[in-house]
Image (cartoon, coloured by chain):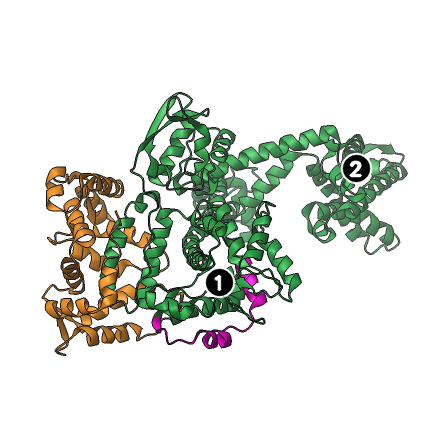
Chain colours: A green, B orange
Amino acid sequence: MAAGVAAWLPFARAAAIGWMPVANCPMPLAPTEKNKRQDELIILNVSGRRFQTWRTTLERYPDTLLGSTEKEFFFNEDTKEYFFDRDPEVFRCILNFYRTGKLHYPRYECISAYDEELAFYGILPEIIGDCCYEEYKDRKRENAERLMDDNDSENNQEGSMPSLSFRQTMWRAFENPHTSTLALVFYYVTGFFIAVSVITNVVETVPCGTVPGNKELPCGERYAVAFFCLDTACVMIFTVEYLLRLFAAPSRYRFIRSVMSIIDVVAIMPYYIGLVMTNNEDVSGAFVTLRVFRVFRIFKFSRHSQGLRILGYTLKSCASELGFLLFSLTMAIIIFATVMFYAEKGSSASKFTSIPASFWYTIVTMTTLGYGDMVPKTIAGKIFGSICSLSGVLVIALPVPVIVSNFSRIYHQNQRADKRRAQKKARLARIRVAKTGSSNAYLHSKRNGLLNEALELTGSTEEEQHMTKGTSLIESQHHHLLHCLEKTTGLSYLVDDPLLSVRASTIKNHEFIDEQMFEQNCMESSMQNYPSSRSPSLSSHHGLTTSCCSRRNKKTTHLPNSSVPATRLRSMQELSTIHIQCSEQPSLTTSRSSLNMKSDDGLRPNCKAAQITTAIISIPTPPALTPEGESRPTPGSPGHSTNIPTTTTTTTANIVKVSAL
Amino acid sequence: SADTVEDEMEMATVRHRPEALELLEAQSKFTKKELQILYRGFKNECPSGVVNEETFKEIYSQFFPQGDSTTYAHFLFNAFDTDHNGSVSFEDFVMGLSILLRGTVQEKLNWAFNLYDINKDGYITKEEMLDIMKAIYDMMGKCTYPVLKEDAPRQHVETFFQKMDKNKDGVVTIDEFIESCQKDENIMRSMQLFENVI
């Protein structure tokens, strides 16, 4: 609930009078304001700059430093003000959060300084308002990447990676040549051999010297053996490299499918195929073609050059733009080729023998190359030819800058769109969490309210204190309002959350139990026979209830700064799932462990205490309670494999699971 | 959206200033301090000084995250907007709250009757009550236990009329309403529930 809207809570509660004549049941009691203080101004002195605000403004968020009693540690008796030795600039944003309910992230602020301040004041960054959240996340990601780079380089320098296996070290060496000297050596050796291989391919075809017989031979045939040895050596190296990479790859399947490995394979295949096929003269033509593929070895350089990789990625991402350019060019070429063909058809000895033949002329003209091997001779041909060359300038020259700028824009836009999409999901999730958070908080406090009353019955005061300081006054008033609505309509809230729908049936059963008791106590009169009504409806729900509560716990501990403070909620949950040893020892331990999500050991003693001191069942008392018009269902006693005595503190082994009442 | 922009411009220029604090104190049953607290909250949410129906619905829906409270908020708005000019000023707000929180039981019941009587003709018909009831049930939302049945509002209306409509003429007048409410202990008790809200 936004802080500003909390000021309208009195209005919403007053308006609830409109439901009263309609309701069929008595309404729950309103929460009382214990020691209601007059609202006072408090002074916050942050490094000399004084801020003043109402006390109630700060108390809107009781799980932060300023909203809780933690600020008393900073109270200066002499000057009667709270002194914080922190940054006053950031404090401005934080105080505005209390005032308006929205936390903003100023752009000029350093991200790590801001994070530190938030951590100091106990505010979770997730509640930064939508207006500033993207900026915050971007800056945070940049910072994290920078830190990661720093860490990596640190690690590289230290060389302290003892935990990697041999295979992983090898893979790392392949991917980052700078990790060790061996990797660097390997990197340079392969680079050298790639260069040698490429140069060999090139030089092979150069005619070097004549052979007696007046025939110019290319070097490849003159020094065939030498070149063959060089080729073999290169292919050996490449094969070894490929096999090593294949061995070291974390996911071999993915490695085989990657572009670089395909290039590797294509680069070395011709040699092996050539080895296999040398004897067969018929396919020697095909074999020669295969040698063309050796030029692919030059692409192996892309492992060595970052720039090549970026270029490749650029082309890939710009593919649609290039495709469009190609398509429009093709259209223009076909049009002009057709026109030129029919224009030149009349003239004799024209080179424009067919439309495909005219393609060559059109392309050469449009790209303003103008080789001159094909020229139109007729007047019509010349006219159309000039139109063709003029339009060529336009068709070629115009799209290219457009494409370049388009590409640049689309590239950035894509990045921004992806970011926004990723953040949108996160944002929707946050909104949903906040929504369910408030209804979750209400359901929890409902249960805790019951526990409270039950504890009052048994008279144990320690847990009661635990309970009452849990929710703030505003929250309890809000919950009271929702409770009145439930009473008016005779329905009750369920939590709507897909996460919980996995075991929705169990939750529903759980709710059934809970609300059924509610309804019974509400709708029916004291004639209700409690034990009989309860036992059939509550078949043993040992496992279910614990799992429900543990999961609900899991949900609530993730909620940032929402209605109920996480720490206090945890303690409340501990108490509300008072497990008492039944025959189900294992489930106890598992559920306990799952309850202690961020386990403080400090909470465990509490649980133990609760476990021992309270068994909240009181069968004889209910008929006496109901006339008071307050729904006090004797909480719990689901699952009774055991006998339930009157409310006493019991340390016996006869204990019943009272989960979440 | 052009309309809303213009609307907002209008709202911005019509910066309503409430009457003097002393005057409001005399007219309502609140003390000066209470009025100050009320106004601070009011002004925070509506800097322009008046609430229009949209803002009203938004604010009210914050309290009921699970259901759809717009219909009920609409009726509530009409109940507060006593001069029916489409906006609730701080005076309207204070007068309404004064009745609800500090008024006599009679006044409160009167206010409730006014809320239910949608067309303000002095009679609550079954249709009006059904609208109100549906609006209340809508606020609960879809995920309830037990699952909301189709005719639950109607049945609720029937129960209501059985209790309130003494002469069984199908409408409830203000006198029947007040008389029946005064006989019902639960209702009387719940009227006192929100005494200490401010």
Q: Quadrant of residue A622?
A: bottom left
Mark yes or no: residue A403 visible: no
Disc 2 chain ID: A
Q: Amino acid at mark 2?
A: Ser
Q: Quadrant of residue A398?
A: top left
Classify 10 Å Cα crowding around label 2: few (below 14), some (14-19), many (20 and above). Answer: many
Residue A536 belongs to the span the image colors magenta: yes
Q: Residue at x 60, y 47 (%)?
A: A599
Which residue position holds label 2?
A: A197
Q: Earlier in the sequence, mark 2 or mark 1?
A: 2
Image: magenta residue range: A523-550
On screen, residue A31 versus residue B93, left or right, reads: right
Q: Residue at x 28, y 72 (%)?
A: B153
**Side of B99 where A631 appears, left or right:** right
- The residue singled out by tag 1 in the image is A661
Q: Residues within 10 Å of mark 1 (few under 14, many from 20)?
A: many
